[in-house]
Amino acid sequence: MARTVESPFMTTEEAARYLRIEPKTLHNMRWRGQGPNYHKHGGRVFYHIRGLLRWSLRNRIG
């Protein structure tokens, strides 16, 4: 029986859902050079879950 491995990489839609923002907002931040770090695998954009958390904690207010 094959074992399924959970990937730490998320698509833009998955990352936006994780951060509770719209995918278009995440796309716009990426285009402006803002927002969380991302990777490109085969021309597709992916976000690592640790990078999303790190970015969120750096942008904490209060």
Image (spheres, helix red, strand yellow):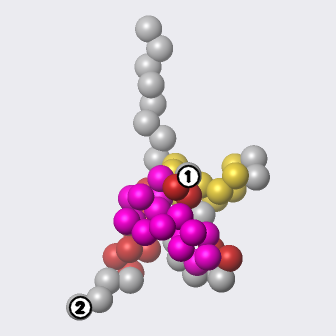
The residue sitting at 56% across, 52% down in the picture is 11
**Mark 1 lies on residue:** 11
The residue sitting at 46% across, 62% down in the picture is 16
Q: Left of 52 or right of it: where is 44?
A: right
Q: Is residue 48 visible?
A: no
Tell me which segment is drawn in magenta.
14-29
Q: Does 22 lie within the magenta span?
A: yes
Amino acid beneath label 1: Thr
| Secondary structure state at the residue bearing disc 1 | loop
The CA span between labels 2 and 1 is 29 Å
Q: Does 52 lie within the magenta span?
A: no
The quarter of the picture where residue 57 lies is: bottom left
Give x and y (percent) for residue 36: 52, 71
Give x and y (percent) for residue 4: 44, 25
* Location of residue 56 with respect to 19 vertically, above or below: below
| Secondary structure state at the residue bearing disc 2 | loop
- The quadrant the C terminus occupies is bottom left
* Location of residue 33 with respect to 45 vertically, above or below: below
The residue sitting at 70% across, 52% down in the picture is 44
**Mark 2 lies on residue:** 62
The quarter of the picture where residue 18 lies is: bottom left
Given the current orientation, which residue lies at the most extreme bottom position? 62
Given the current orientation, which residue lies at the most extreme right position? 43
Give x and y (percent) for residue 31: 68, 76
- The quadrant the N terminus occupies is top left
Nearer to us of marks 2 and 1 is 1
CB-based contact (under 8 Å), mark 2 and mark 1: no
